[in-house]
Amino acid sequence: MHEGSIWRQTAETKRYGRLTGNHEADIAIVGAGITGLTLAHELSRSGLRVVVLEAGTVGCGATGHSSCHLTTQIGFSYRNLAKKFGNDCAAKVADSRQRGIAYIEEKAQQGISCDFQRVPGYLYAEKAAKEEELVKEAEAAAQAGLAVTLEKKAVLPFAQAKSIRFENQAVFNSQSYLLGMARGLEATRCALYEKSRVVDIQEDGKRVITESGSVKVDKTVMATHLPPFLNLLQTLAAPYRSYVLGVTLKKNYPAHALYWDNEDPYHYTRLYEKSGRKWLIVGGSDHKTGHTPTEPDPFADLENYVYARYPVASVDFRWSAQFYEPADGLPYIGLSPFENLYVATGFSGDGLVYGTLAGMLLADRIQNRDNDWSEVYNARRITPRASGAHFVRENADVAKHLLWDRIRGARELEEIEPGQGAVVEVEGKRLAVSSEAEGDWAAISPICPHMGCVLQWNGSEKTWDCPCHGSRFHRKGELLEGPATSSLPDKTESVLKNLRNLAKTP
Ligand code: FES
């Protein structure tokens, strides 16, 4: 089995250099995912000088690790949206998502080879008890302007109740798409840099500092999950992880379409064909970051789901991705509280389409053009009634991990079995210790360098994850995912020394 996304495995690769020295440009975009590269395209078309700064490599975040569903439907549901924000808002969200998909289609038609294909989408209820919910959602989606029909027959090869059929959805390979978008920038005034982590933003967004250089600009756009330097937004979006498998079946592949159920957490399914091979792509088992279940772990849980419903020949790929749930159900796209700093975050599990429309919307905002969607996604909005319960729940969780986790008792080193990790006290200091295999220890500080929450062990991916805002670290301390901007030093030697002392004790 390959540990990694099928999109990144099957797409071509091309590497870009690292930013060094001091530069000047009109706009800096932080993040080379679908939001950043869509925006870079739109700004470059106007002749602006753009610098894109990516901490890792193009598509290494959520874009390259999704399931590549392009849907007009939203996880929050049109019913909830209309109830909280009104029918006009729901119609604008439906319109923006249709135009987001059309944007990708247009790029594919212009020559970006990314396996783009229009397909229908089915939101189905596996249990009859959840049918009523579907009927109401079909009404709300139609009211928002989407072409939907209710279907009674099963759309997948196992028992289901009703489903809603959405017309004009799509699939593609996000990594091939991004590579094509990056190549398209080469003939413009846009410079793209990889391995260039942004460690500071100064002068209200007019100077961007990386580990090895800087760029002086007029405006900066944080096209990252959670902008590291904006504390208010960090209270309004909560991190979650989702898991995906690429599976070969013995027979009975479903038709090319998108499928997702209305369970919580939900499951999502599609097909992918490449070079004469065919895979069923199935995702789900979502959970809040830093709260990774152990029995069963999320990958095992997802495999159980797939084996119970399909004639599986082999599980060939598995990967995971992070997404952020916004407090009131809608993303934050637009100007941050700082005059020259723009953001795009809180896309839930619907990020490929939201990311694309965020790039379109931000290009308009930056160039002072009107955009119908600006108010809907306004990043400065405060919606106490719509955000209330979510805001209180998620921030109570942050407080718990900031305070309670710091004072509660640590476990003993001897209790850690191979494959496990825990916060233990070693010579009076707390360490996040893990054991990969017998004798293969690793230790780092358990305190997240972002805002000081206590890291939690993710046994499924062998990482230390921050439950507060979603930063993630390799077991030896390398930063895998922000908003933190620095790695943690390796403290393994303290553990080894302690074990040597224990061995000497008669
Ligand atoms: Fe914010 Fe860890 S990511 S405290």
Image: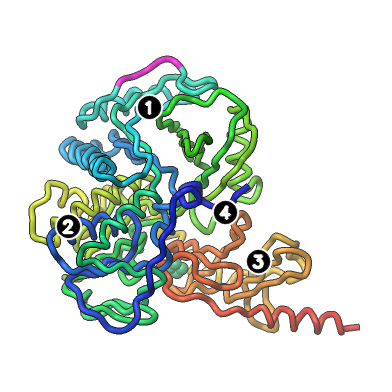
Q: How far, Cα to Cα, is label 4 from label 2?
A: 37 Å
Magenta region, residue range: 149-153
The residue labelled by disc 1 is: 133
Q: Position of residue 125 (x, y in %)?
A: 45, 26
Q: What residue sits 23% from the left and 42% below the top?
A: 106
Instruction: Considering the whole magenta stretch, tell me its main secondary structure.
Output: strand
Circles 4 and 2, Cβ within 8 Å, touching? The answer is no
Q: What residue sits 44% from the left and 43% below the top?
A: 67
Report helix, strand or loop for mark 4.
loop
Q: Amino acid at mark 2?
A: Ala
Marker disc for residue 422: 3
Q: Position of residue 248 (x, y in %)?
A: 58, 35
Viewer can see residue 300: yes
Q: Nearer the viewer, mark 4 or mark 2?
A: 2
The residue labelled by disc 4 is: 292
Lateral position of residue 365 relative to residue 301, left or right: left
Lateral position of residue 342 relative to residue 258, left or right: left
Marker disc for residue 363: 2
* 255 relative to 488, above or below: above
Q: Nearer the viewer, residue 47 or 68?
A: 47
Q: Quadrant of the C terminus?
A: bottom right
Residue 254: in magenta span: no
Q: Nearer the viewer, residue 386 or 227?
A: 227
Judged from the image, the quadrant occupied by ligand 1 is bottom left
| Label 4 or label 3, whichever comes before in sequence order | 4
| Label 4 or label 1, whichever comes before in sequence order | 1
Viewer can see residue 337: no
Report helix, strand or loop for mark 1.
helix
